[in-house]
Image (tube, rainbow, N blue to C red):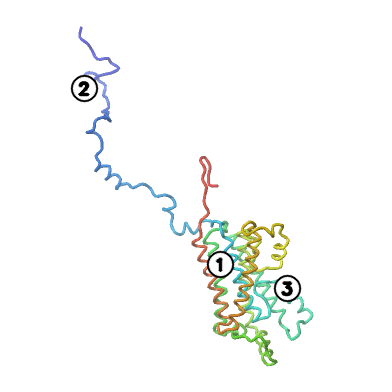
C-alpha cells in the first residue's frame, strides 16, 4: 500500500496539498543569521534614545524646582547684604532700609517732633516702611500668582536679580553723587558743629528718599524669599525675634550640626553683624558708601546666578506610582 502524507501536516514541497506553509527560518542555520556588518550598520542608523535628562533643554532645567539641600546658604549670605546696606542707609539718612522696627519708632517720634533737629526723620522712616511694604506685596504676588511653583530656579534667580538691580541703582546714585547724602566717603568718627549742620542738610534733601526707597523695596523681596524657601528662622533682616528664638531654643547647647535651626540663627547674626562692620569700615575709607553698595549689589547678583546652577530637586519614581 502506498503511503500518504497526513492532511494536518502537509509536506512543504507538496504542490497537491493546496495549503501554503510559511517560510520558517531555522535559527540553527548559520547562513540565515545577520552578519556583524549589518548589526553595526543598524546600530549607527538608529541610535538608542537619549535619556529624558539629556533631551531636556537649558530652559527646561531652569524650570526645575531647586533642591532644598543647603538652600539656606543664599539667605545667610543675604544677611550680610542687609548689614552692608543698612550701615549705608543709617549713615546717609538716619533710618534703615532693611530693619523696619527702628523706622516704626522713628515714625512714632515724629508725631512729637522728635528727635531734636530732625524735622524730616519721620518722613524718611515712612518712605522706607512704605517701600518695604510695597516690596513685600510685589514679590509675594509675583511668587504666588505668576509663578505657581515658586521654588523654580528661574523664579528665584529673577527675584534675586531684581533685588540686585535695585541695589545697583542705589549704588549708581551714590557713585555719581546725584544724592549727596549717599555719596559720602572717609567719614570721621566725630563732627564739629559746621559738619553736623552740613550732614543734617544732606539728610533733609528730598533726593535722599530715592535710594532709600529702592533699597527698602528690594529688602521686602528678600524677606519674602526666606518665607518661600521655608527657612523662617532666617528672616534676613530682623534680629529681635531671632535673638528670642535662639535663646529660647531648648536645644541651644547641642553640638554644632545637631540643631540646624540654632546653627542658622547664629550664622545669620554673625553675617548681619559682619556686613555692618565691613560697610562701616568701607565708609571710613575712600571706597565710601558707593563701594559698600557696589559690593552688596555684586553679592546679590552672584546669588541670582547661583540659583540658575542650583541642583534640581530629585524626582523619585516608584513602580506603579507617579513622581513623588
Say if mark 1 contacts mark 3, CB within 8 Å. Answer: no
Vertical position of residue 262 compared to residue 93: above or below: above
In the rendered image, which quarter is residue 87 located in?
bottom right
Question: Which numbered disc flags the more N-terminal residue, 1 or 2?
Answer: 2
Task: Judge depth for marks 2 and 3 and give the one in front.
Answer: 3
Q: Which residue is mark 1?
A: 160
Query: In this picture, is 134 found above or below 20?
Result: below
Which secondary structure lies at badge 3?
Answer: helix
In the rendered structure, the answer to whether residue 70 lies left or right of residue 27 reads right
Residue 1 horizontal side relative to residue 201, left or right: left
Marks 1 and 2, Cα distance to the nearest angstrom?
Answer: 81 Å
Instruction: Point out which mark residue 104 bears.
Output: 3
Circle 1 Cα neighbour tier, 10 Å, few/some/many (<14 / 14–19 / ≥20): many
Q: Going 71% across and 74% down the picture, which residue do you hit?
A: 102
> Which numbered marker is on residue 13?
2
In the image as oriented, which residue stretches furthest toward the right? 112
Q: Residue at x 66, y 84 (%)?
A: 203
Amino acid at each position: 500500500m502506498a503511503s500518504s502524507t497526513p492532511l494536518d501536516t502537509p509536506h512543504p514541497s507538496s504542490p497537491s496539498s493546496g495549503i501554503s506553509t510559511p517560510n520558517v527560518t531555522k535559527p540553527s542555520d548559520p547562513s540565515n543569521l545577520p552578519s556583524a556588518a549589518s548589526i553595526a550598520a543598524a546600530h549607527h542608523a538608529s541610535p538608542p534614545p537619549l535619556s529624558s535628562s539629556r533631551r531636556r533643554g537649558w530652559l527646561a532645567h531652569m524650570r526645575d524646582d531647586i533642591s532644598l539641600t543647603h538652600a539656606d546658604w543664599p539667605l545667610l549670605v543675604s544677611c550680610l547684604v542687609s548689614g552692608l546696606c543698612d550701615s549705608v542707609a543709617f549713615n546717609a539718612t538716619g533710618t534703615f532700609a532693611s530693619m523696619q522696627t527702628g523706622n516704626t519708632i522713628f515714625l512714632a517720634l515724629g508725631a512729637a517732633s522728635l528727635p531734636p533737629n530732625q524735622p524730616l526723620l519721620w518722613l524718611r522712616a515712612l518712605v522706607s516702611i512704605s517701600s518695604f511694604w510695597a516690596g513685600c506685596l510685589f514679590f509675594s504676588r509675583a511668587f504666588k500668582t505668576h509663578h505657581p511653583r515658586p521654588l523654580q530656579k528661574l523664579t528665584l534667580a529673577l527675584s534675586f536679580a531684581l533685588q540686585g538691580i535695585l541695589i545697583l541703582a542705589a549704588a549708581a546714585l551714590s557713585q555719581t553723587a546725584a544724592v549727596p547724602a549717599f555719596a559720602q566717603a572717609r567719614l570721621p568718627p566725630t563732627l564739629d558743629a559746621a559738619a553736623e549742620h552740613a550732614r543734617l542738610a544732606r539728610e533733609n534733601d528730598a533726593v535722599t528718599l530715592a535710594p532709600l526707597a529702592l533699597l527698602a523695596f528690594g529688602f521686602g523681596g528678600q524677606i519674602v524669599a526666606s518665607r518661600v524657601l521655608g527657612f523662617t528662622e532666617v528672616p534676613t533682616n530682623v534680629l529681635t525675634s531671632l535673638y528670642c528664638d535662639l535663646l529660647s531654643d531648648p536645644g541651644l547647647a547641642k553640638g554644632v550640626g545637631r540643631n540646624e535651626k540654632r546653627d542658622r540663627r547664629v550664622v545669620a547674626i554673625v553675617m548681619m553683624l559682619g556686613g555692618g562692620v565691613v560697610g562701616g569700615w568701607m565708609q571710613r575709607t575712600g571706597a565710601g558708601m558707593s563701594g559698600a553698595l557696589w559690593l552688596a549689589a555684586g553679592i546679590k547678583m552672584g546669588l541670582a546666578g547661583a540659583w540658575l546652577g542650583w541642583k534640581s530637586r530629585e524626582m523619585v519614581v516608584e513602580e506603579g506610582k507617579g513622581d513623588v
